[in-house]
Image (tube, grey):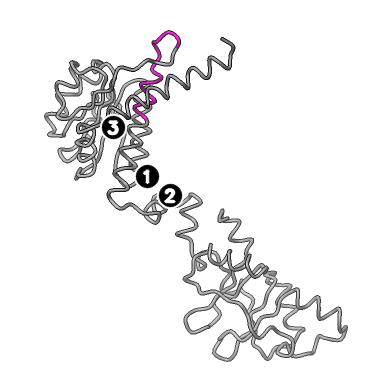
Amino acid sequence: MNDLDIVRQVFDIEINALQKTRDSLGADYLKILNAVIECEGKVVITGMGKPGHIANKIAVTLSSLGTPSFYLHPAEALHGDLGMVTSQDIVIAISFSGESDEITAIIPGIHWLGSKLIAISGNADSTLVKNSELSLILPSLKEACHMGLAPTSSTTVALVLGDSLAVAASRINGFTKEDYARRHPAGTLGKKILIKVSDSMHTGERNAVLHVASKIKDVIIELSIKMLGIVSLVDDEERLIGVFTDGDLRRLLERNADTYMLPVSEIMSRSPKWINKEALAISALNKMKELNISCLPVVDKAMRVIGTVRMRDILHMGIM
């Protein structure tokens, strides 16, 4: 076998283990899924060694998809961390042999706390399975390790089983993109769903606003001081009447050198594009892309100008 054949064999063995496990799923798996869905507390995942790393990943996946969960290190549980578990929780223990010393040692404590213990194991006659209320017995699997020693296929199967529980519970419980975004506020999806125009706009002294009766000279000064690329022009009630941009200024200077004392009302755009402060920042970004502009006045329900939002500021926040 060449090197690539060795690599492909690992894939083949682990894919076969996944297919074998998938085909074996039935009533026992559904009982565990229902226990996860109906859990009134948290889903505690535990495992020792490499299954422990898998258990940790399963816990964070469950939590991110709407099922509160945490990883419990069995050795640390023996020294006080078992106190994090309550009678409303369920504990899912992953151990292919079902005889890991650290796992079997915490079984009495879990029972004393009144938590439901669930086993995921490859050994139906193990201490873990015999002392669990529910169990999922994995089919006989060949490890992808060439010596048959390192947990490879078995940990892959455990990982996918955990993913399937998290995804199925999330879907059955009606978990939405909005729910996901609230749990991932720093992620791209979270930013798209949670960040509003009001979170990214320039307001107060940082905003560029002038009365519609202003002269071009005043507009040029406002453009240069605020550096937003746009000045919103308002009436006595601060309602949006028009806009004047740095592009308008360039075109004006190309036509007429003596422009400074002209009223801006004679040159401004009288059909300005705008956006409401409650709109999502991604909506503002998409609108600017569609109109091929770089900034928008922000208005309230009465069309009063309260800010300016720029494409570059939205992009800087990580919204694409």
What residue do we see at 53% from left, 66% from top?
283
What residue do we see at 64% from left, 83% from top?
271
Between discs 3 and 1, the one toward the N terminus: 3
Residue type pointed to by label 2: His
Tell me which segment is drawn in magenta: 146-159
Q: Using the image as rendered, state which of residue 49 and residue 113 is in the foreground.
A: 49
Q: Using the image as rendered, state which of residue 262 and residue 133 is in the foreground.
A: 133
Residue type pointed to by label 3: Ile
- Check whether the beta carbons of the residues at disc 1 and disc 2 lie within 8 A of each other: yes
Label 1 SS: helix
* Residue under numbered circle 2: 184
Classify residue 58 as left or right of residue 259. Answer: left
Where, quadrant-wise, is the N terminus in this rendering?
top right
For this orientation, the residue located farthest to the top is 147
What residue do we see at 37% from left, 28% from top?
54
Expressed as whole percent of the image width and height from the top left, the position of residue 93 reads 25, 27
* Residue under numbered circle 3: 45
Q: Residues within 10 Å of mark 2 (few under 14, many from 20)?
A: some
Residue type pointed to by label 1: Ser
Expressed as whole percent of the image width and height from the top left, the position of residue 5 reads 55, 15
Label 2 SS: loop
